[in-house]
Amino acid sequence: MELNRSPFARPFPELPHIDGVKLRVARAGYKTWERADLTFAELAEGTAIAGVFTKSACASSEVEMGREQVRQGRARALIVNAGNSNAFTGYRGREAVEQIVGQVADALGCEGEQVFVSSTGVIGVPLPKDKARSGVEAVLAAEPCGWEAAATAIGTTDTFTKGAGASAMVGETRVELAGFIKGSGMIAPDMATMLGYIFTDAAVEPAFLQAMLAKANAASFSCITVDGDTSTSDTVLLFATGKAGNAPLGSWDDAGADAFYAALLQVCRELAQLVVRDGEGAQKFIEIAVGGAADDASARRIGLCIANSPLVKTAIAGGDANWGRVVMAVGKAGEPADRDKLSIGFGGTWTAKDGQPLADYDEAPVARHLEGQDIRIDVDLGLGDGRAVVWTCDLTHGYISINADYRS
């Protein structure tokens, strides 16, 4: 399937070296594409891990096993398969994952629970164990590669490769973060988005690493949507090798904890927004800022209801400042709202205030704003102090074309 490159495509960034991480790629042949579809990360002994996973009741075996494994807090390897999600595949899917885990654990001489596996692609087709075995053999023997190659190998309908990096000072020690992600469709996460992996050389205790990832996720990956559909395989993992040599972070009171979290949040938000910018068929990136809600959680739910509305998304695709569709989405969200206190704007121009259109409303600046690629919708409910920002994209015929032909 030939995919049109996103208008938001950008060159892959220069990401910092992370001591304690060795990357390799290989071709397992899960689909007919002639490219690497297997990414492997070997991690230094003692690497801490944190993870967030889909809440889907039909999650893959990779997710079910990862949820259990992440609790022990340490990782030695990550292996990611692209082209086959191995979800809804019963015991055969589980056996394939266990085979991969055992194969990698034997090669590294580590415990199986320290080997993390992710898969993405078509649902309902068991991961072929013969291809999985030969793929692991090939990737273990491959030469080390860089971030871009590792990120490219995990893509499916992505039209560009996505990465982000940051640094922070923890005490007197500079620590680095680097991450990559795949995702373009089936994006409406309850916790994370598709497959994302972040690596740092900072020393962080596993429990605190988990707390920071959960907090960063709530303000990034859980604030995006492309189509309202939550994947069976959504996973974000954060690995901390400890090789920077800083005093280990264990609580928010530790020196440098806030700086490290700020860098982590920056990486998470950049990766999350790149997924939306590569949304299947997307031509416009939409930021929805909700204020005046009963509380922050209510604001986020209202924002996502607007972002998931096909009527809102198609209006933006057509450059139509149809604020009535935003009213509709606010009203159906099931959250506290008062029609006579509601205000709506586009691109910094209010179109309606306190439940009615402005008498002197001039649509010209709004129309100009909607001609651009980056769109902003403002909503003020006039009820309280709750605020949230969510990100989505428009809905075009390109989305239909991609998903109608997905399995072919």
Image (cartoon, rainbow, N blue to C red):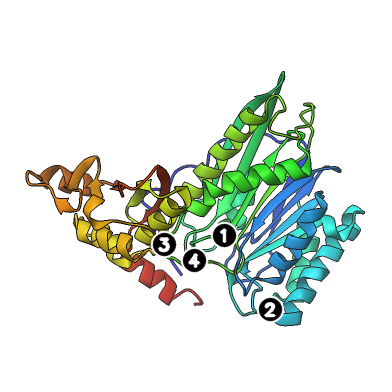
Three-letter code, disc 3: Glu
Mark 3 and mark 1 lie on one chain; the one further toward the N terminus is 1
Tell me the distance, in whole angstroms, between the alpha carbons under discs 2 and 4: 20 Å
Q: Which residue lies under the disc numbered 4?
A: 186
Residue sitting at 27 percent across and 58 percent down? 326
Tell me the distance, in whole angstroms, between the alpha carbons under discs 3 and 4: 9 Å
Residue at the left extreme of this rendering: 360
Count the labels in the image.
4
Q: Which residue lies under the disc numbered 2?
A: 126
Mark 2 and mark 4 lie on one chain; the one further toward the N terminus is 2
Three-letter code, disc 4: Met
Mark toward the viewer: 3 or 1: 1
Of residue 54 and residue 102, the one placed in the foreground of this image is: 54
Q: Residues within 10 Å of mark 1 (few under 14, many from 20)?
A: many
Q: Which residue lies under the disc numbered 1?
A: 194
Three-letter code, disc 2: Pro
Q: Secondary structure at mark 2?
A: loop
Tell me the distance, in whole angstroms, between the alpha carbons under discs 4 and 1: 8 Å
Residue 271: image location, x then y, percent:
53, 46
Residue 13: image location, x then y, percent:
53, 38
Mark 2 and mark 1 lie on one chain; the one further toward the N terminus is 2
Q: Answer above or below: position of 22 versus 310.
A: above
Q: Answer above or below: position of 249 versus 54.
A: above
